[in-house]
Amino acid sequence: MNIKKHLSNLARKIVLKFADPVVKRRVGNRHIYMRLSHMLPIYQKTFVLYDTAIARVAGYIAKTKPGLVNIVDVGANVGDTASLILSTVENSRIICVEGNEAYLPLLHKNFDGCDSVIIEAVFCGESSSVESGLELDTKEGTASLIRSSENSKKIEFKTVDQIVTEQFSAQEGIDLLKVDTDGFDYKVLRGAIKTLKKYQPAVLFELDKHFLLMNEEQPMSVFSLFEDCGYSRFIAYDNTGYLIGLFHISEKENTERLIDYFYSRRLYMDILMIADESLIRTSYQNEQNATLSTVGLI
């Protein structure tokens, strides 16, 4: 570690002992506001491909269709994904879904006045409802909903199906769905079944067996859901953004072994589902090149 980086990290730790100020950070070719405690800038300096696949996939989609690329970002946080996508695909419309009051002020600060971004200040679930008995565990720029018998605050949920119906016409639909909700991803996806069957968007979601089991989810269940919606193959990434490979949904034993491997190391994967065969072939080839280029092999 060089001296400048060491001093920067030391200064950050000292400041965070007393406060968590709002800072401006570059994400893509845009600057957005986030808390100093947010780990994204540190992760992306350490792991060049961390959380970047979504923007590249949006770019692949943009090359295959005319007009806007329509995107729903569930678990939008402060808008880092939207910032990255807009840096790659200017001709896009992004619905940022975020219910966490710790992130919403910064999300609005970053995108109010931006015609390409619409903010939905709700949580997503498998049904549209208002629930209590949940609380948010927020730390270092991420958050997850956990069950709590002590919290009686009511939380509004919408399904992805409802949001897509409200925000997009039946003719345009949705091209890309991102879900990052730390263990609630499967519930969100069960609330998107109509959308998945009708439009078959590319879907990027997090698969963390540790969080899934905490929420009484079966890690393999989501693959049957996608198979029923017309998807047959998926691309997997490790938790730092590096490509693992291209897999068939029908190869359940291989998938289960892969999930267990990451679980045994307390790591997670990102899963990219693409129904269109031409798009998934192109995406996989380009993702291979992105990974090889990062490690200096091409």
Image (cartoon, rainbow, N blue to C red):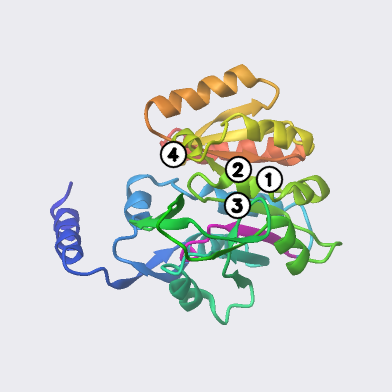
In this rendering, the answer to whether 255 lies above or below 293 is above
Alpha-carbon distance for marks 2 and 1? 6 Å
Q: Which residues are magenta?
A: 68-79
- According to the picture, the residue beneath numbered tag 2 turns out to be 186
Of badges 4 and 1, nearer the viewer stands 1
Earlier in the chain: of badge 4 and badge 1, it is 1
Q: Residues within 10 Å of mark 1 (few under 14, many from 20)?
A: some
Q: Say which residue label 1 marks.
A: 190
Q: Are marks 2 and 1 in contact (CB under 8 Å)?
A: yes
* Residue 179 placement (x, y as % from top left): 58, 50
Circle 1 or circle 3, nearest the eye: 1
Identify the residue under disc 3.
178
Earlier along the polypeptide chain: callout 1 or callout 3?
A: 3
Which residue is at a point 33% across and 56% down the rendered structure image?
Answer: 140
Q: Are marks 4 and 1 in contact (CB under 8 Å)?
A: no
- Whether 189 is drawn above or below 236: the answer is below
Inter-mark Cα distance, 4 to 1 = 23 Å
Of 122 and 278, nearer the camera is 122
Q: Which mark is residue 81?
A: none
3 vs 2, front mark: 2
Residue at screen point 68% across, 57% down:
159
* Amino acid type at image mark 3: Lys
